[in-house]
Image (spheres, grey):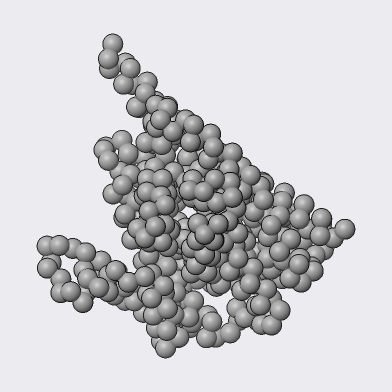
Amino acid sequence: MKELFDLFLTFARIGGLTFGGGYAMLPMLQREVVERRGWATEEELMDYYAIGQCTPGVIAVNTATFIGSKNRGILGGIAATLGVVFPSLVIISVIAAFISNFADLAVVKDAFAGIRVCVFVLILNAVVKLGKASVKDALTLCICIAVLAASVLLDLSPIVFVLCAGVTGIVAKVLLAKEGKK
Amino acid sequence: MIYLRLFFEFFKTGLFAIGGGLATLPFLQDMSARTGWFTTDQLADMIAISECTPGPIGVNMATYAGFLVRGVPGAVTATLGLICPSVIVILIVARILKRFKDNKYVQAAFYGLRPASTGLIAAACLSVAVIALTFPKAAGETGLPQIRWQAVILAVILWLLMNLGGIKALKAPAWLKKIGKLHPVVFLAASAVVGIIFHFAS
């Protein structure tokens, strides 16, 4: 019970501190889940993000469910997920009820223009960390650059890139390795 | 039964919106046209509010839409509807993954997936950079966007504060190392204050 509550609280904190959607959650996850709690490794975090891209739903929720269920089974997955959405429910309900023009306030606009800069730098740091863990040789470097370029230049669903990368991995590691042995 | 319908509509959104928060947007537009629960203007407000409050954007949008329809119980119903498909699908995927974790095909797939995941996040980082560091283009304006120099300076300072302490060759003083290890929320709060003081939005 205590562990479930722990999952709920940790993910509530992550949800409450994440500004700007799923990707902005990454630095918080690295900090709280990987470094502080050891509930997942950098590699697992990347796996969850890749899977979250091609399964239905919000990436932040998918990742929370994954990490929760890995540590405490189905109940853990539910506890972590409820945690990550809890702050949104409270904050948005309060804003919807009391401050109808919240997003138009000058102070709010200025503050968020500043916060967005910080979110950018935090995500940049996260990308560097992930790059160190995932780019191990020439092929993985190529995949990383190709996906980056393709998602900037082409208007395709990320599912396509994720599937292609998975297939490339299988072809390169399993099939070509067999060829080499012959 | 409005709550059942709310739950079901957002359940559908959660099931079919693949690829993160803003992927829910077309479904919400469709929902607005079919149900009349909220107008497209309210949808635009919703996006603005979601983007400047904490939490996943998709969840924020569901909560806001549910609240407009039936207050707090509506907000809870819509949010639970939205996350239900994710939770079910991921629990199944997690179970399968656990069983096949050591399978060589699964491992090879992840060897390719991880750099792809990094590339996708790098692309997202780039689009955040454009929003954070440049002015939005006026309608019909072409060419390179105008740069917010204030924002660029803040970004450089933040990067230095977060990273200099970690570079061993520099032999950074202890206080710099301490700053680099601060919780991200400290930097977020400081950036909000800087934004307010220097009127970043104007």
Q: Residue furthest bottom?
A: B197
Please indicate, yes or no, whether residue B194 appears anywhere in the rendered image.
yes
A27 in relation to A131, above or below: below
In this orientation, does residue A168 appear? Answer: no
Q: How far across and how far down the image is residue A33, in percent?
A: 42, 57
Give the image location of residue A81, x and y in percent.
Answer: 58, 56
Residue ID at (67%, 55%): B82
> At 60% from the left edge and 78% from the top edge, which residue is drawn?
A103
With respect to residue A175, does B96 lie above or below? below
Report the front residue among B180 and B126. B180
User: Which residue in the rendered view is the most extreme toward the front?
Assistant: A1
Residue at image point 59% right, 39% down: B92
User: Which image quarter holds the N terminus of chain A?
Assistant: bottom right
| Front one among B71 and A82 | A82
B186 with respect to B89 (left or right): left
Total marks in image: 0
Q: In which quarter of the image is the C terminus of chain A?
A: top left
Residue B90 lies in what quarter of the image?
top right
Question: Is B168 in front, or is B201?
Answer: B168
Which x, y percent locates residue B125?
Answer: 41, 59
